[in-house]
Amino acid sequence: QVQLVESGGGLVQPGGSLTLSCVASGSVFSIYVMGWYRQVPGKQREVVATITPRGGRTNYADSATGRFTISRDNAKNTVYLQMNNLKPEDTAVYYCYARNQGNLHYWGQGTRVAVSS
């Protein structure tokens, strides 16, 4: 089992920045990939960015490319999402995600990000 706890959401003005954090616990040694997804009411959850904890390989959604940066601190079992130049359309609940080598999926409880003036 893997437990994920997010933090760092909040209200920010357009053009502002936020950093989300996700701390993993439990069977962290089995994690193959971690990432961030987001969801707005009435829409499907969509991937924002992913990272492989061991190799640091990253992937970004087109909407995140150039504005968001995913990173990890393996010593702290933590993944971060640095979000810059935030736009109103980035408003969503952001979920931390992990998949282990057995292809089991884990989700955090979500953290809300609101971009508004």
Image (tube, rainbow, N blue to C red):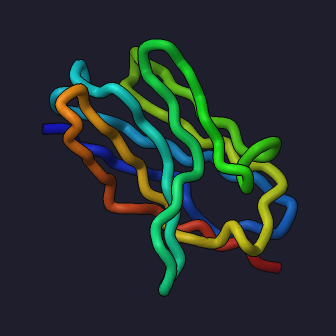
Residue pictured at 86% horizontal, 61% vertical: 15
User: Is 40 left, or right, of 33 in this rendering?
Assistant: right
Q: Nearer the viewer, residue 80 or 62?
A: 62
Image point (38%, 46%), residue name: 97
Quarter of the image with the C terminus in it: bottom right
Which quarter of the image is occupied by the N terminus? Answer: top left
Residue 47: x percent and y percent? 53, 53
Image quarter of residue 71 = top right
Residue 82 image point, x, y percent: 67, 42
The x and y percentages for residue 96 are 41, 49
* Residue 109, x across and y down, in percent: 32, 61
In the image, taking residue 57 as reference, residue 110 lies left or right, namely left
Q: Nearer the viewer, residue 13 or 110?
A: 110
In this picture, is 26 found above or below 97? above
Q: Single out the residue that lies furthest toward the bottom.
A: 42
What is the tally of numbered marks visible in this picture? 0
Q: Is residue 109 left or right of residue 39?
A: left
Work out which residue is located at the far left of the displayed protein and give it: 1
Whether 33 is drawn above or below 61: the answer is above
Q: Which residue is at the front of the view, 29 or 15?
A: 29
Give the residue displayed 46% in from the left and 62% down from the top: 111
